Image (cartoon, rainbow, N blue to C red):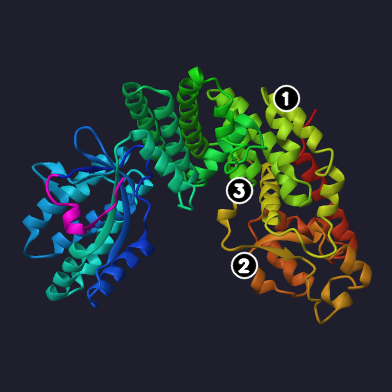
Amino acid sequence: MTPYKHSLKEFFEGEKEFSIPVYQRAYSWEKSQWQVFLEDLEEATKGENHYFFGNVLLEKTEDGKFEVIDGQQRLTTIVIFMRALINVLNNETARLEEWYLIQQNKPKLNAVEYDRDYFYDVIIRNDDNTHKPQTPSQKRIKGAKEFFTKELKAQKTERLAKILDALEEAEMLQIVFANKKDSVLMFELQNNRGKELTNMEKLKSYLAYQIYTYADKEGAEYRLKRVAEIFKEIYRVLNDIRILDEDAILQYFNMAKYGFGYRENDDTLSYKSKLKKIEDAEKLDWIDSYVKELKDAFMDFKTFENLKSEYKDYLIDLKVWEIYPFVIKAYTLFRNDTAKLERVFKALEVIAFRDKLVKTRADLASRLNQVLKNFTSVEKLEEGIKEICSGYWGNRAISDAIRPKEYSLGRIAPYIFMRYENSLLTQNTKTKGYGFTLDQIKNPQIEHIAPQTENKQGGQASGYCEYDQEFKERYLHYIGNLMLIDQAHNVVIGNKPFKDKLDSYNNSPMQQHKEINDFASDGRWDKDSIGRRYRKLEKFILDTWSLKD
C-alpha cells in the first residue's frame, strides 16, 4: 500500500482500465462541484504550482485492471471534462481520446454497473442519441457534459491549451490495494470519516463487505452481481418517484419492518444490528431477502404514487411522514387488493389529518409504533387508529383547534375547505359527480368573512356585529368565520360591508360561498351566524375524520 504521486497524464498512461465497483456510489456531483472543478483548473493556469487532485485509492484485480475505491467522483468528472474538451478542441483530439477515454476499444473508465452502458455511449463514444438518462446519476452525467461543453466553448483556443496543460500536469496520490475485502473495508472506513454518502450508498457498501466476509470468492462475485442488478432496478424506479428521495424510502421501509424505533445512523438500532443477530450461515440469505424486499418497497412506492386513489391523493397533500411506513407495509400485505389498500389509506388519512390540525406536542410516531407492529389486517389498523384518536388527537382536541383565539389553522385550513367543498357538491343534484381540488383556485387563501380589520362604518351600516372583546376572542378566528377563496377575489372584497361581500359570494361558483346566505341573520353576519356555521363545520369535520364502528 505504498502511495505513489503521479501526474494525471501518468495516471492514465498505457492500457490501464479503471472501473467503479458495485458497492460504490453512482455519480453525484452537480453544478456547484463542476463550477469549483473548473475554477480550480483555471486558477492552476495562472501559477507555477501544479493542481493537486487528492488521493485515489485503487484495488488491482487479477486481470490487471483497477477498481476505484475512493476518488471516483473526481475521476469520473475528469473523464467527462476531457470528453467536453475534446469536443471543443480542433487538434490533438485523437491523442487525447486514446490516452484518457478509450484505447483498443477498451474504455479507460467504466462507470458503476447500472450506469455503465449510458456512460460508455454518452461520454466514451460521444453518442447523445442512443440513451435517454434513466437515473438521477445519468442525468448528472449528461448535465456535467453539457455544462463543461458550454463553458469551454466560451474560451479562446489559447486558453483551452493552458487548461489542458494544467489538467495533464495536475498531481494525485495513488494507493493500490491487492485484497478485495481490504479495499471494501477501506471504502467503509472512508464513509465513516465524514464522506457525504446517502444512506442507500452506505447500505450498498456495507452489504458488499458482508458478502465478501461470509462468501467464498466465486460466490461473492455472483452474489454481488445479483445485488448490483437489484440496485440498478431500484435506481431506475427511483427516477420515476417524485415525492420522496431514496433515503426516505429506505428509512420508511426499515420502519415498516422493525417499527418506529428504527434509526438509520445508529448501529445498535439499524439493519446492522439485525444482521449481527443472524447466524453466520444464514447471513447471506438474509442479505438476499433484504435487498429483494427493498426493491419491492421502491416498486410499491412508485405504484402508490401513480395510483388513482382519492385517499392516496389526500395522504400526499397532508405531508405527514409517519403514514409512509404503513403504506409500505400495506403493500406487502395487500399488494393486489385495491379495496383493502383504499381502506388503509382512508384510515391513515384520519390520523394524519388529526395530527396536522391538532398540533399536539405528543409524538405521533411513538404512539403509532405498536399500531404499526400489530398491523396485519385492515381491521387491526383501524382499531389501533381509533384508539389513538381517543387521546391527544380526540374529538375535544379537534373542536378546540377549530375555534382558536388567534388564527392558527395555517395550511390545514385550505385542505379542510377543499374537502368541505366536495361534500357540498355531492349534496347538490346539479353538481353531484363534480370534484374539486385546490389546483382549481389560483393562489388559494383563507378569507375571514367578518374581516380581521373592522369595517370603518361599523355597527348596522357594515352588516357585522360589534367587535367587542367576546367577538374578538371567541368568534373572529372560529372556523365558522372562515372560507376558501382565491387571492384576486379576496383582494377585491377586503373588509367591505357584508352586503357587498355577500353579493360577490352569491356570484361565485363555489358552494361554500353560496351557502353563506343561509347562515346570515337578516342580512347581517354576527356571532349567531358564525356559531351556526361553526357547528355545521364541526359536525362535518368530526364525521369526515372519524372511523365509524
In this rendering, position of residue 97 left or right of residue 60: left
**Of the residues shown, which amino acid type is indicated by label 1?**
Lys
Query: In this view of the protein, can residue 244 be seen by the observer?
Result: yes
- Which of pointers 3 and 2 indicates the residue nearer the eye? 3
- Between the C-alphas of marks 1 and 2, the distance is 44 Å
Vertical placement of residue 453 versus 205, above or below: below
**Of the residues shown, which amino acid type is indicated by label 2?**
Gln
Label of residue 487 in the image: 2
SS of the residue under disc 1: helix
Mark 1, Cα crowd under 10 Å, few <14 / some 14-19 / many 20+, is some
- Between the C-alphas of marks 3 and 2, the distance is 20 Å
Please name the residue that numbered disc 1 is placed on: 380
In this rendering, position of residue 153 left or right of residue 141: left
- Can you say which quadrant of the picture contains the N terminus? top left
Start-end of magenta stretch: 1-15
Q: Position of residue 102 (x, y in %)?
A: 13, 47
Please name the residue that numbered disc 3 is placed on: 317
Q: Nearer the viewer, residue 247 or 70?
A: 70
Mark 2, Cα crowd under 10 Å, few <14 / some 14-19 / many 20+, is some
- Can you say which quadrant of the picture contains the C terminus? top right
Q: Position of residue 248 (x, y in %)?
A: 54, 44
- Which of pointers 1 and 3 indicates the residue nearer the eye? 1
Which tag, 1 or 3, sits closer to the chain's start?
Answer: 3
**Of the residues shown, which amino acid type is indicated by label 3?**
Asp
In this rendering, position of residue 357 left or right of residue 174: right
